[in-house]
Amino acid sequence: MEQSVVSVDVVAVRFCDEDGGVRIGIAPRAREPYAGELALPGVLLGRGERLADAARRAVHAKLGVPEAAIDAVGQLVTFDEPNRDPRGPTLSIAMWAVVGLHEGPARWAGFDEVPELAFDHNRIVEVARRLLTGLLWKDLPFTRALLGEEFPATRAVEAATALSGARPDPANLNRTLAAIPGLARTTERRRVKATGRPAAVWAFGAEE
């Protein structure tokens, strides 16, 4: 039986005011197969390499994200379709990464704006979006990296809407935020848009 190789493919997301929402990074492939076609950043897992290290390597090398701008990474799911790669059997371990604003050559697209991608990367994005929606508010490393140590409630609404595709109910969202360990509503209110009302600011306390 032909031995499968392992690739690490990364759904890199950033959530910056300049982007206007949560966006994922894609870039043209430099080599065959699918040279020149857009794809998620990915690398073959090196011998003895940790998944998180491979994910950071992929985001840095394929999207041009400085290592200092990669805030956090984590694992999502494995794709094991035998024919997903024309080079032969390849397992894809999908990872997430949250990155900060930076200068670089990658293209950043909203989940509803992702074009046709190489391999099965559109399927990876589809599944990752659902999983990331489930991680938001439940996985602290992902949530803190995406939202920051403090954020207005409107930013929480924007993040939840971008990931799930549906605007959350404000009352339910407030209850969800209040239940997150280490997160508390402050007395500060912040105006995000010139015409909008000031929003309550939430902040994480010191890590335990």
Image (cartoon, rainbow, N blue to C red):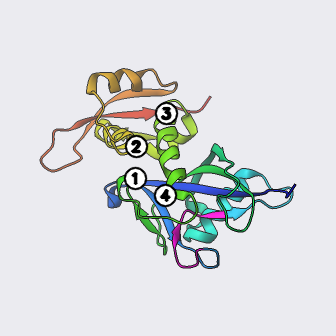
The residue indicated by pointer 4 is: 100
The residue indicated by pointer 3 is: 134
Query: Magenta span: helix, strand or loop, mainly?
Result: loop
Q: Nearer the viewer, mark 1 or mark 4?
A: 1
In space, the residues marked 2 and 4 are separated at their CA atoms by 17 Å
Q: Residue at x 59, y 61 (%)?
A: 68
First in sequence: mark 1 vs mark 4: 4
Q: Note whether 27 is above or below 131 in the view shown.
A: below
Range of the magenta residues? 34-42
Question: Total label count?
Answer: 4
First in sequence: mark 3 vs mark 2: 3
Residue 99 visible: no
Tell me which amino acid carries mark 1: Phe
In space, the residues marked 3 and 2 are separated at their CA atoms by 9 Å
Describe the element under mark 1 as helix, strand or loop: helix
In space, the residues marked 1 and 3 are separated at their CA atoms by 15 Å
Describe the element under mark 4 as helix, strand or loop: loop
